[in-house]
């Protein structure tokens, strides 16, 4: 089954053709990152307008790269949420119009479920159940993936997402947007113990997280250095920040695997590209005897291939979107997004 999938929840306009949920036939991502970098973060109105401008070209490009015409596509899928509402509506309405005009099935997809599915594209052997750490610019959560369309958030950041923390600190440091890759690249040769930052502690819940304390402490350190004329050692500061975020995430994820008696651990979302988090999790998984799964680097950040993968499993579970399918800016991962109607 060939699915044409569209993703436009934030600042990437993306389209892909995916076969049977596991094979990428084409995968086109138009990133608006340079436009938003001018403002130090995503400007929702600019994101929506740019999606409108390029979506048709991006979809045509994906079909052309796949070497297939619309008649060879079995279903059309799109991210329906969570995300920026104006941005979501562009991809969702385009996909709905295309599906209904060409008499094809339409499948709405939950963006975070899509991120989890990025691992199915990278690892043909991966099947639920497993624990998945999902860390992106908007969300940081630990998910118990019981089945392809049955999942539950068992731990969540009570304040900032890990990616947001990197983005905000990078802006104050003057390293630009997006902050995660900038900080990750800046840490080369740094000493991760030079600037000890507080490791988030949520004492009343085993898997919940918090990143606002790390963010505030890091920003205070930068301002303090500016006020006293101290020259910040950027590689060590970046390494210390990556260390603090990783030390907040890793023990909780491992504890979740132990408590749920699961030997498979997957990671996804933009922050899963972080080199410290990757190597810490790899080391810990080896010690604990866990199989660990990371998406291919190009599938860590937003793309439509992951939406096409999850759409296939939603289709198998009988999920279909109607012409009334609406977008939603926030929805728990356990909810059925195909029931969000106008
Ligand atoms: O999943 P994603 O592309 O978009 C959302 O759904 O939010 O994640 C983007 C986030 C940004 O906050 C970005 O700074 C972060 O992922 N990110 C990283 C790295 N690469 C991207 N964070 C830490 N280290 C990285 N190497
Ligand atoms: Zn995302």
Image: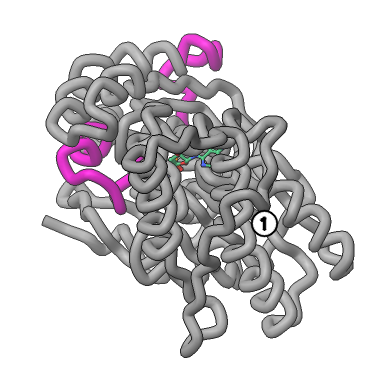
How far across and how far down the image is residue 58, in percent? Answer: 36, 16
Q: In which quadrant is the N terminus drawn?
A: top right
Task: Please give left or right for residue 102 compared with residue 46 in the image.
Answer: right
Q: In which quadrant is the C terminus drawn?
A: bottom left
Residue at (67%, 48%) from the top-left corner? 192
Front-most of residues 142 and 216? 216
Quarter of the rendering containing residue 29: top left
Within the magenta stretch, is there residue 72? yes
Q: Please report the bounds of the magenta region as a residue range.
A: 63-92
Please name the colour scheme applied to the rendered image: one colour
Residue 305 shows up from this direction: no
Front-most of residues 90 and 102? 90
Within the magenta stretch, is there residue 170? no
Q: Secondary structure at mark 1?
A: strand
Task: Please give left or right for residue 98 compared with residue 237 in the image.
Answer: left
How far across and how far down the image is residue 195, in percent? Answer: 57, 51
Residue at (47%, 47%) from the top-left corner? 311
Front-most of residues 340 and 241? 241
Q: Which residue is mark 1?
A: 266
How far across and how far down the image is residue 117, in percent? Answer: 57, 49
Residue occupying the far front of the picture? 228
Residue at (75%, 48%) from the top-left corner? 279
Mark 1 within 8 Å of ligand 1, using the beta carbon? no
Front-most of residues 78 and 219? 219
């Amino acid at each position: 089954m060939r699915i044409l999938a569209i993703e436009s929840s934030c600042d990437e306009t993306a389209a892909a053709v995916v076969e049977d949920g596991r094979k990428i036939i084409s995968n086109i991502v138009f990133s608006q990152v340079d436009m938003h970098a001018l403002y130090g973060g995503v400007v929702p109105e600019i994101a929506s307008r740019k999606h409108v401008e390029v979506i048709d070209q991006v979809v045509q490009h994906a079909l052309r790269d796949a070497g297939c015409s619309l008649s060879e596509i079995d279903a059309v899928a799109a991210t329906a949420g969570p995300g920026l509402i104006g941005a979501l509506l562009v991809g969702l309405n385009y996909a709905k119009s295309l599906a209904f005009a060409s008499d094809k099935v339409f499948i709405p997809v939950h963006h975070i479920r899509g991120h989890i599915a990025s691992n199915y594209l990278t690892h043909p052997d991966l099947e639920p159940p497993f624990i998945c750490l999902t860390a992106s610019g908007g969300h940081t959560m630990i998910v118990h993936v019981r089945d392809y369309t049955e999942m539950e958030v068992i731990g969540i950041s009570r304040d900032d997402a890990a990616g947001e923390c990197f983005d905000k600190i990078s802006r104050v440091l003057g390293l630009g947007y997006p902050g995660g890759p900038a900080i990750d690249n800046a840490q080369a040769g740094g000493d991760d113990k030079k600037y000890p930052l507080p490791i988030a502690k949520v004492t009343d819940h085993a898997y919940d997280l918090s990143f606002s304390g790390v963010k505030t402490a890091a920003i205070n350190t930068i301002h303090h250095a500016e006020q006293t004329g101290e020259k910040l050692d950027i590689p060590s500061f970046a390494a210390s920040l990556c260390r603090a975020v990783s030390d907040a995430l890793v023990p909780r994820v491992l504890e979740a695997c132990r408590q749920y008696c699961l030997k498979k651990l997957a990671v996804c979302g933009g922050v899963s590209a972080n080199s410290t988090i990757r190597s810490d999790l790899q080391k810990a998984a080896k010690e604990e005897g866990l199989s660990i799964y990371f998406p291919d680097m190009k599938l860590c950040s937003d793309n439509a291939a992951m939406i096409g993968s999850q759409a296939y499993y939603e289709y198998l579970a009988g999920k279909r979107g109607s012409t009334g399918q609406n977008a939603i800016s926030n929805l728990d991962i356990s909810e059925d997004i195909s029931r969000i109607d106008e």
